[in-house]
Image: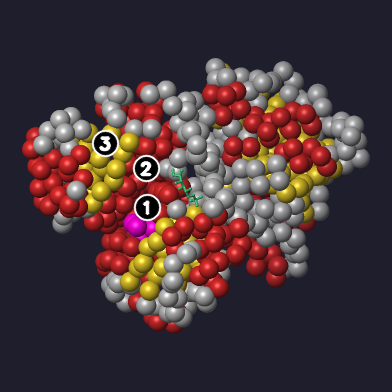
Amino acid sequence: MCGIVGYVGKSNCLPILINGLKSLEYRGYDSAGIAFKNGRGIEMYKTEGRISDLQKIIPDPVPRAKTGFGHTRWATHGAPSSVNAHPHVSEGVYVVHNGIIENYRELKSELTQNGCMFSSDTDTEVIPQLILVYLREGLSLKEAIKKTISRLRGTFALGIMSDNEPDTLFAIKRGSPLVIGIGDGEYFFASDVPAILSHTRKCIFVEDNEMCILKQDGISLLNLDSDRAISIDERKVEINWTPDMAEKEGYDFFMLKEIFEQPEAVKNTIREWIENPQKLLGELGITKKIVKELRRLQIVACGTSYHAALFAAYIIQSLARIHVDVDIASEYRYKEHIVEKDTLFISITQSGETADTLAAQREAQKRGARALTICNVVGSTSAREADAVLYTRAGPEIGVASTKAFTSQMAALCLLALALGTCRGGLKTREAKSLRDNLAMIPSLLDETLKQNTLIEKLAKTLIHTKSSLYLGRGISYPIALEGALKMKEISYIHAEGYPAGEMKHGPIALVEQGLPVVVVCPKDNLCEKTFSNIEEVKARGGRIIAITNNPSYFRDKVDDLIEVPYTHPVFTPFVTVLPLQLLAYHAGVFRGCDVDKPRNLAKSVTVE
Ligand code: M6R
C-alpha cells in the first residue's frame, strides 16, 4: 500500500523521483505527490491520479533540485484526492508515509484540542502536526521526529524533510518496507528496490524502529530503541535483481507474490478489530437496535467475491444466527427482490467498480435497503455509494486472479459474523474469545500452509495434459471447491467444475473416468465422514483423488495425493484449504505456458454489464 521514494545528491532529483515513483505504481496509483528543495525553499505538487498526471502539473522546464521525495498512494484513510495525496505538510514539515497510523483518531483529537487545524482526511497528517508541536517545544528536528514516532501505533515507512534543515532527509520504518540506496555521492530511500535499481545496487534494508538520516555528504543509521548508531558497512548488501524482478520482489508473477502476501493481507484486515469486533459495528453505523431487529442479510457479488459471499452465509448463519441470502450480482439486479426494513444488503467487491455489483447495490438502495460494502479500494464507486464500508486491507492486487483479496474478504466477514453474533447474544463471551483467538492465528497458519508450495508445484506438473477436473467440498468447504475450480479454469484453462460433494450422485458422477483428477476439500469437521463416502464413490469409478485436508491420518491411504494443511477451528478452515488450490492453479498455468497475471479474455475489473 503506497510507495515512497527520496533522493539527496548532486543530480537533479525530479527525474529520479518521477521514475522511482513510476516503478512503485504497482503499490498504488490513485494519487501522487512530490516535494523538493529549490533555491528558495520547499516546493510541492500533488494530484489525484497517476504519476503521469503528476508530471502534467510540474512546471516546464522541470525545476532543478538536489533533495526531494515523492509518494504514490493507495488510499486507506480518505478518498483519493489532491488534498489527501502526500506529502502532508505542517508549517514547513513535510511527510510521505506508507502504512496505517492506527491511533490517528486519538492523536488528531488531542492535536485539534490544542488548536491544530487539519486539511486532509488522512491518518498521516497527524505526523507533521506532532513534529511541529515538538519543534515548538524547543526540540531539534531529529528529537521531535523521535518523540513523534514514540507516539505512533500501527505501521509506517516515513520520509520527512523540513525547512529547518535544508538538504537532509529522514527515513524511518516500523512494519512497512523501507530500503536505502547508497550511490556515489548520492543516497536514496524507497519502499521497494525497483525505485532505485537503475542508480545503485548497494542497499540497506532498514529494520523496524531504525532511522536513517540522509545528507549529501553521507548517511547515518540509528536504532531508535537503543539510541545507538548502526554501522553502515555491516548492514550494506549488494543486490543482483533486474528492475522487473525487483518489482515482483523476485517472484515470476504478481499472482504468486500476492498468494504469498496473504498472511500479511489477512493480518492487516483484522488488526484494527480483532480485539473487539463489536467496535466495528459502531464504526459502520450499525446500532445495537439495528442488529437486534435484523431478520435477513442479502449478500451480492461476482466471481471470487461471490465465493466469499457463500462463505459468509455459512459463517454468519452459524455464528450470528441470521438468515443470509446470497446472489450473483448479475442475477440479483433483475430479480424481484423483497427488501424489508429489517434487511441489510451487503456487496462484496475487491475493486469496488464491478458494474453488476454496483447495479445490484443501487437496486437494493432504491428499494430502501441499507447497503454495506466490503471493498478493497478506498474511494471506489461502491465505497462512495454505500451507506457504510468495511475495507479489506489486502493492498493493490495486480494479478487478474483474485487471491489475497479473497482471503481478506473472508477475514472481514469473520469479523462481521463475530460482531453480529456477540451483539445478538448468540455468542457467549468465552466462545467469542476462543473464536477471536483462532482467527488471530490465521496469518501464521497461512505462512505454514505456504510451505507446501514445492509439493504442490510437483503435483501441478502431473496435471499439464489434463483436459478436465472436478472440485468437491461440503458445507463451508463447498465455496472453496468452487473457488479452486474457478482459479484452475481462469489461470490454466483446464476445465474445472466445482460441486457440493453430496450432489455428485445427481449427475456429475457420470463424468468420472479413469484418471480424472478430483480435488476434494475435506478438512476435519462434522462432514468429514460424508465426504469420505463421496471419495469412495469417485475411486470406485477410477477417479484420481487429490485431497486437501488437515486430517491426514484419516485420508492418507485412501487418496492418490494429499496436501496437508494446518489444523484450525472448523469455521476457519477455508483460509488454509484455499491456498493450496490457488497454488495448484498457478503452477498448472505456469507449466502450461499461460500468462497467469493476464489470463486470456479477462480483465481485472469488469466495469461493463
Ligand atoms: O472486483 P470484484 O471483486 O467485484 O471482482 C469480481 C470478479 O470479477 C473477480 O472476483 C473475478 O472473478 C476474478 N478474476 C477471480 O479471480
The quadrant holding residue 247 is: top right
How far across and how far down the image is residue 58, in percent? 84, 39
- According to the image, label 2 marks what residue? 486
**Could you tell me which residue is drawn at 73 percent across and 49 percent down?**
48
Seen in the image, is 593 located left or right of residue 573? right
In this view, 560 is above or below 40: above
Seen in the image, is 2 located left or right of residue 597? right
In this view, 599 is above or below 298: above
* 319, 229: nearer the viewer: 319
- According to the image, label 3 marks what residue? 469
- According to the image, label 1 marks what residue? 307
The quadrant holding residue 276 is: bottom left
Task: Quadrant for the N terminus, please.
Answer: top right
The answer to if 309 sits in the magenta stretch is yes
**Which amino acid type is marked by label 1?**
His
Q: Is mark 3 on a helix, strand or loop?
A: strand
